[in-house]
Amino acid sequence: MGQGKEVKTRPDPEVEIQEKGEIFFFYRPKVGKDEAHGPDDVQRMYIVLRPESAGGGGRTVEEKQAPDSGKEGRKRRRQGDGAQEESEEKGADGGHGKEEVNIEDQPLLRLVVMGRKSLPDPAKHSRPYWGYVELVTTKVDDIKDALKEEEYSTATRGKRHRAAARALGEGVYRIVKHESESGSGGRRRSPRPHTHLVYKLELPSTRGAMEPQEAMNVEPEASFLVQVKNPDPPSGGRDGGFRGLQSKRRAAFPAHLQDAFGGRRYAPADPPDLLNYEGCELLLIAASDDVEDELGLQLEGEVEDGEGEGVETPQGALGCSDLVKMFGEVADVKPLLSGSWD
């Protein structure tokens, strides 16, 4: 359906759009289960971000990890030289090195795993939710491989079956840089700009049921503060109770991106290129379920209510959904089209 568009409903020079694109939500039933009938049956929740524009300034190029690093590099080595596959259970080194990708000419895809198997409730103030970037790639087939069903063997339990992921939602998103508001007397409060991940769903239709979406806090629209964890944090201090990834799996940012932390344990996702490294750990913090009220931005998908009513039918959605076109052959789309569990 494309990246949609946004409309500023009030002047706010302190809101800067850094990235635009499509967002897809998925969940996977627990190992050994063929279906999920509620959140207790869910093994993992995934977010796929597909940036299609780098925001203001006419920037069309993003920096990502080198193609020979992380899981992306391991996949390419397997395909290129027929090397013996390593067990997925052993993990992979985080992304490192760098290359430039023109995101208007070729796809760039990030697969994010949410640790608590849901999003924070955007209408409530709660603890941050931890997640990490599991895969960054320019190949759609790599994401398909991560979402498809799988048979694998373990030493203790023999053969195991992992069901295919289920499509949960499709929409448009923005990564927005927001400066701190002015305090009394025109003085700044703490001069700390922050970044938001905001989205609006296009599918499933909010006119129907949204059972798994509501259970996993995938609201029709939402705003979250997004912070990136320093992979080389300063010693001492509190870490918010998040154990995080093993050091070998964390991202290894180039020096100019590592400098964004400035010795802090967390930093805004500024630039969004920080999210283009496997092993990047992040926090999502509930901000609002009304993006316009919070930031003065109204997100619009390619097809808005009242236009193209055929999209409201499963047949119409199948014809225009980018999620279905890219991943429908490996991921069950019933929850996306019907708003119901398996």
Image (spheres, rainbow, N blue to C red):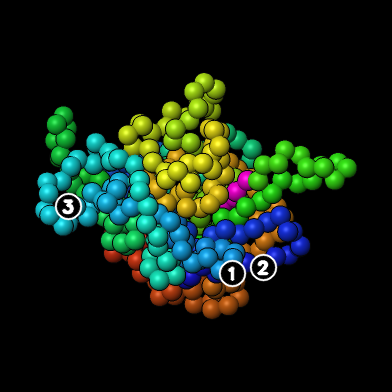
For this rendering, which residue is in front, 220 or 260? 260
| Residue 149 visible to the viewer | no
Q: What amino acid is found at the position of numbered circle 3 in the picture?
A: Arg
For this rendering, which residue is in front, 39 or 217? 217
Could you give the CA–CA distance between mark 1 and mark 2, rounded to whole angstroms? 7 Å
Disc 2 marks which residue? 7
Question: In front: mark 1 or mark 3?
Answer: 3
**Percent x, y of residue 53:** 51, 66
- Which residues fall within the magenta stretch? 194-198
Q: Give the main secondary structure, helix, strand or loop, of the magenta stretch.
A: strand
Q: Are marks 1 and 2 in contact (CB under 8 Å)?
A: yes
**Percent x, y of residue 325:** 36, 69
For this rendering, which residue is in front, 341 or 152? 152
Residue 46 among those drawn in magenta: no
Note whether 78 is above or below 54 in the view shown.
above
Q: What amino acid is found at the position of numbered circle 2 in the picture?
A: Val
- Closer to the chain start, of discs 1 and 3, is 1
Quarter of the figure with residue 227: top right
Disc 1 marks which residue? 5
- At horizontal 16% and vertical 35% (from top left) the residue drawn is 154
Disc 3 marks which residue? 78
Q: Are marks 1 and 3 in contact (CB under 8 Å)?
A: no
